[in-house]
Image: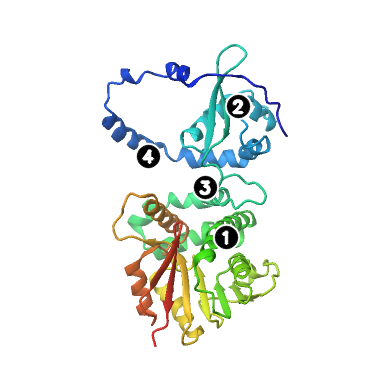
C-alpha cells in the first residue's frame, strides 16, 4: 500500500540547529559526556534490538521500500499503512523511528505540519539494507535478529548467573534441554524451527557467497560432504561456483527430509558423532563452535577417518584474537561468542591457539587460517600422516 506523499515544507538545516538545545549551555565537558553517556547507553542498549525487531515484524522497512527507497514518510502515514487503530500509534512510531535514525538505520528530514509545528519524516538509512526483507536481496540481518531476540533464546540469558555460580556446564545443558530451551526447541517447536532455519540460511547466503568468490580450496576436489549442512544451502552455493563437485549434505534424519532436491547434491541422514561420509573435503560450518573440546575432538577424529590421505577439513567459524581489541571485527567476534554461550552450552568460539590444540588432539597438522569474510574465517586442517 502506497500512502499519499504530500510535499510538506522542509526546514533548513540552519533553522534545525536553532531549534535544538544549545551546546554552549552544557556544563559537562565532551570527555565527561562520552564516559558517562557510554555507561548509560550500555544500560539501555537492550532497547535497540527489541525496537528494531518490532520495526521488522511490523514491516515498516518494507513500507518505506515500496514507496520508493528515497521516500520520506510521516509517522501518521506509516501508521495508516499498518492500519493501526491505536490513536497513539503515530506518536509511538515517532519515538521508535528517531532512535533508529540515531544509529543510521533510518534517515530523517525535519519538516512542518499544516500548523507550522516540527514534523519528522522518515526513510531508509545507510545501514538499513541488511534489514529490509525485500524479495531477491541478500538480506541476512533481519532473520538473524528475529532468532536472537526470540523468547526461547533470550530466556537463556536469565539462567546465566545462577548456573555460573551453582552448576557445571553439564547441569546447565541438562536443565536447558528439558526446560524448553534452545536445544529442545530447535527440534520440537515448529515455529522456532522455522525462525532458526531462516536465520541460518539467510546468513549463509551472504558469507558463503562471499567465500566461494575468493577461496580456491574447492577447485580440484571431486567430493565434498557438508557436516550438519541443514537443507543444503551451503552446498548449493558451492556447486553454483564448482558444478564439477559431488556434494553430500549430511545431517540428522528430521533435517534432511526437509531438504529440497538439487542437481549434484545427495542428502544423507546420519549422526556426525557416529560417523561422517567419506569425501575429499569435509566442510564444517558453524559446527565446531557449537561443541565443547571433547566433542570437537571426537568429531574431528571422525573426519580424519573419512578423509583420504591428502584430504582436508574446511572449518568455517569465527577465530578470536588473544587480546580483546576494540575494532568492529573483534567486537563482533566476541558478541558472536556470547551468542554461542547462550545458545549452545559447552560450545565456544576459539582462538588460533585453541584450534591448534584441537587439531593436534585429532591427528591433524596445525590449522591453516586461509581467509576471512566478515567475521567468518576459513580454517584448513590437513591430515598428519
Q: Which quarter of the rendering shows the C terminus?
A: bottom left
Disc 1 to disc 3, C-alpha distance: 15 Å
Q: Residue at image x 59%, y 42%?
A: 56
- The residue under label 2 is 75
Q: Reading the chain from its start, which is encountered first: label 1 or label 3?
A: 3
Secondary structure under badge 1?
A: helix
Q: Reading the chain from its start, which is encountered first: label 4 or label 3?
A: 4
Secondary structure under badge 4?
A: helix
- The residue under label 1 is 186
Q: Nearer the viewer, mark 1 or mark 2?
A: 2
Disc 4 to disc 3, C-alpha distance: 17 Å
Q: Reading the chain from its start, which is encountered first: label 4 or label 1?
A: 4
Q: Nearer the viewer, residue 271 or 214?
A: 214
Secondary structure under badge 3?
A: loop
Disc 4 to disc 2, C-alpha distance: 28 Å
Near mark 1 (Cα within 10 A), the count class, few <14, some 14-19 or many ≥20, is: some
Secondary structure under badge 2?
A: helix
Locate residue 57, reporting x and y percent: 61, 42
- The residue under label 3 is 149
Q: Reading the chain from its start, which is encountered first: label 3 or label 2?
A: 2
- The residue under label 4 is 42
Q: Reading the chain from its start, which is encountered first: label 4 or label 2?
A: 4
Locate residue 25, reporting x and y percent: 31, 17
**223 left or right of 307 in image:** right
Q: Which quarter of the rendering shows the N terminus?
A: top right
Locate residue 161, reporting x and y percent: 37, 51
Q: Quadrant of residue 383?
A: bottom left
* Camera sees residue 179: no
Amino acid at each position: 500500500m502506497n500512502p499519499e506523499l504530500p510535499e510538506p515544507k522542509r526546514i533548513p538545516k540552519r533553522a534545525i540547529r536553532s531549534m535544538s538545545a544549545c551546546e554552549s549551555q552544557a556544563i559537562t565537558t565532551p570527555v565527561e559526556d562520552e564516559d558517562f553517556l557510554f555507561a548509560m547507553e550500555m544500560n539501555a542498549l537492550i532497547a535497540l534490538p527489541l525496537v528494531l525487531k518490532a520495526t521488522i515484524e511490523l514491516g515498516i522497512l518494507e513500507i518505506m521500500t515500496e514507496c520508493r527507497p528515497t521516500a520520506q514518510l510521516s509517522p501518521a502515514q506509516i501508521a495508516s499503512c499498518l492500519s493501526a487503530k491505536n490513536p497513539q500509534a503515530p506518536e509511538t512510531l515517532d519515538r521508535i523511528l528517531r532512535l533508529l535514525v540515531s544509529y543510521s538505520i533510518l534517515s530523517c528530514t525535519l519538516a512542518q505540519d499544516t500548523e507550522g509545528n516540527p514534523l519528522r519524516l522518515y526513510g531508509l538509512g545507510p545501514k538499513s539494507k541488511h534489514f529490509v526483507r525485500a524479495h531477491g536481496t541478500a538480506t541476512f540481518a533481519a532473520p538473524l535478529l528475529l532468532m536472537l531476540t526470540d523468547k526461547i533464546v533470550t530466556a537463556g540469558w536469565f539462567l546465566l548467573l545462577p548456573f555460573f555460580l551453582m552448576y557445571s556446564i553439564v547441569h546447565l545443558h541438562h536443565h536447558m534441554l528439558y526446560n524448553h530451551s534452545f536445544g529442545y526447541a530447535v527440534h520440537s517447536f515448529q515455529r522456532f524451527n522455522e525462525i532458526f532455519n531462516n536465520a541460518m540460511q539467510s546468513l549463509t547466503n551472504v558469507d558463503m557467497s562471499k567465500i566461494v568468490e575468493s577461496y580456491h580450496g574447492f577447485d580440484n576436489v571431486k567430493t565434498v560432504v557438508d557436516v550438519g549442512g541443514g537443507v543444503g544451502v551451503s552446498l548449493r552455493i558451492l556447486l553454483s561456483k564448482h558444478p564439477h563437485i559431488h556434494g553430500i549434505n549430511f545431517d540428522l534424519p528430521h533435517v534432511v527430509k526437509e531438504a529440497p532436491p538439487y542437481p549434484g547434491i545427495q542428502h544423507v541422514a546420519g549422526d556426525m558423532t557416529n560417523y561422517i561420509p567419506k569425501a575429499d573435503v569435509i566442510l564444517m560450518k558453524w559446527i565446531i563452535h557449537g561443541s565443547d573440546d571433547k566433542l570437537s575432538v571426537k568429531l574431528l577424529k571422525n573426519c580424519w577417518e573419512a578423509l583420504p590421505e591428502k584430504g582436508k577439513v574446511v572449518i568455517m567459524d569465527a577465530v578470536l584474537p588473544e587480546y580483546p581489541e576494540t575494532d568492529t571485527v573483534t567486537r563482533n567476534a566476541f558478541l558472536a561468542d556470547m551468542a554461542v554461550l547462550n545458545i549452545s552450552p559447552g560450545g565456544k568460539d576459539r582462538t588460533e591457539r585453541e584450534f591448534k590444540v584441537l587439531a593436534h588432539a585429532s591427528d591433524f597438522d596445525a590449522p591453516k587460517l586461509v581467509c576471512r569474510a566478515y567475521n567468518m574465517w576459513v580454517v584448513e586442517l590437513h591430515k598428519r600422516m
